[in-house]
């Protein structure tokens, strides 16, 4: 049985795609997941998959992922109006001068709302117990965040008993939307600024392959010229910067392993890409139909990926 580590890139609502990918991958019995990592929305998906696997197996993991994204969707009249306003405002940014307001200028709403949403699906006490005396074959979980003050990269690790609901919030705390999140006496922002997602520690779990679920496209066919297209491409490049550095590290080690031979071995890297042309503002979009489309696209892309694997 092939042993794999799953690395989930962040990207807001676009990571509903990751939820669909993980649901399909985990249902396949031809490989064993030894590690998961994620940042921001990818951290949420990685946590749900890991928690589900440990508490009820692949079926429970898939159920948690699907229900979380259903629960995330803007369904009430007020929520739909707020969603349309936020996405519309994001699309105006860069085209017209808009006021920017610090999240410290008003009561903290985003953090408690996120925590409430996540704890509907993950029991915080049970999450802590799962890390107390883990069996040797328990998958590793890593969540990426950035230390605001020191500038250090942080990968919260289940092996160090660091995975908490607050750590997930720290990984997803986008500046100007969330306040910096205090965890362990340090302050953190979204892991986009550090490891998106953490990769270099995944070999510690002994995978034969690392499967990266990429949200931000690596390449574009045409030169971005409008303000909106430039903003989209800038966001994609920023989101990919740390991932490319992490993958370069693994590929360099693979070169050494190839030269040295036994007992050293390479770790194969494969990628599953979100192949939809989406703008950066849609990373905030929580319309039910949009999230369902992304989740379904993830399942389809994962099925095609599995079908194309070498036997």
Image (spheres, rainbow, N blue to C red):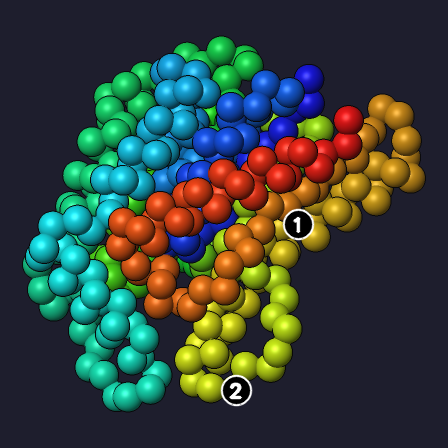
> Of 87 and 289, which appears nearest the observer?
289
Residue found at x 43% / y 85%: 227
Q: Secondary structure at mark 1?
A: helix
Residue found at x 24% / y 74%: 89
Q: Is residue 184 left or right of residue 23?
A: left
Q: Position of residue 38 (x, y in %)?
A: 46, 42
Q: Which residue is mark 1?
A: 247
Q: Position of residue 302 (x, y in %)?
A: 56, 38
Residue found at x 48% / y 80%: 230
Q: Is residue 47 left or right of residue 97?
A: right
Which label sits on residue 225? 2
Q: Is any atom of residue 41 visible in this view?
A: no
Q: Position of residue 6 (x, y in %)?
A: 56, 36
Instruction: Using the numbered discs, state the Cα–Cα distance from disc 1 to disc 2 in whole angstroms.
Output: 29 Å
> Of 305 and 219, which appears nearest the observer?
305
> Of 34 and 161, which appears nearest the observer?
34
Residue found at x 45% / y 59%: 193
**Hey, which quadrant is residue 98 in on the image?**
bottom left
């Amino acid at each position: 049985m092939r042993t794999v580590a799953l690395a989930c890139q962040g990207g807001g609502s676009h990571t509903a795609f990751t939820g669909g990918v993980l649901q399909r991958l985990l249902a396949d019995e031809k490989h064993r997941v030894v590690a998961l990592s994620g940042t921001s929305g990818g951290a949420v998906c990685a946590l749900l998959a890991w928690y589900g696997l440990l508490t009820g197996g692949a079926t429970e993991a898939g159920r948690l992922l699907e229900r979380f994204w259903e629960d995330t969707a803007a369904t009430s009249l007020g929520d739909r109006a707020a969603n349309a306003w936020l996405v519309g405002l994001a699309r105006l940014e860069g085209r017209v001068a808009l006021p920017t307001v610090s999240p410290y200028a008003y009561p903290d709403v985003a953090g408690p709302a996120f925590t409430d949403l996540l704890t509907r699906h993950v029991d915080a006490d049970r999450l802590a117990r799962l890390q107390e005396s883990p069996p040797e074959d328990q998958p590793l979980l890593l969540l990426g965040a950035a230390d605001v003050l020191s500038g250090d990269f942080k990968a919260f690790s289940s092996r160090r008993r660091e995975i908490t609901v607050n750590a997930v919030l720290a990984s997803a705390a986008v500046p100007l939307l969330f306040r910096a999140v205090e965890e362990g006496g340090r302050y953190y922002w979204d892991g986009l600024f550090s490891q998106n997602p953490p990769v270099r520690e995944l070999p510690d779990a002994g995978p034969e392959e690392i499967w990266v679920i990429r949200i931000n496209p690596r390449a574009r066919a045409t030169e971005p010229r409008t303000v909106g297209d430039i903003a989209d491409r800038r966001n994609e490049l920023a989101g990919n910067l740390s991932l490319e550095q992490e993958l370069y590290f693994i590929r360099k080690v693979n070169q050494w392993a190839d030269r040295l031979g036994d007992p050293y071995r390479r770790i194969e890297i494969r990628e599953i890409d979100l192949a939809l042309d989406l703008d950066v503002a849609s990373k905030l979009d929580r319309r039910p139909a949009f999230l369902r489309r992304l989740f379904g696209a993830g399942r389809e892309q994962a099925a095609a990926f599995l079908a194309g694997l070498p036997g």
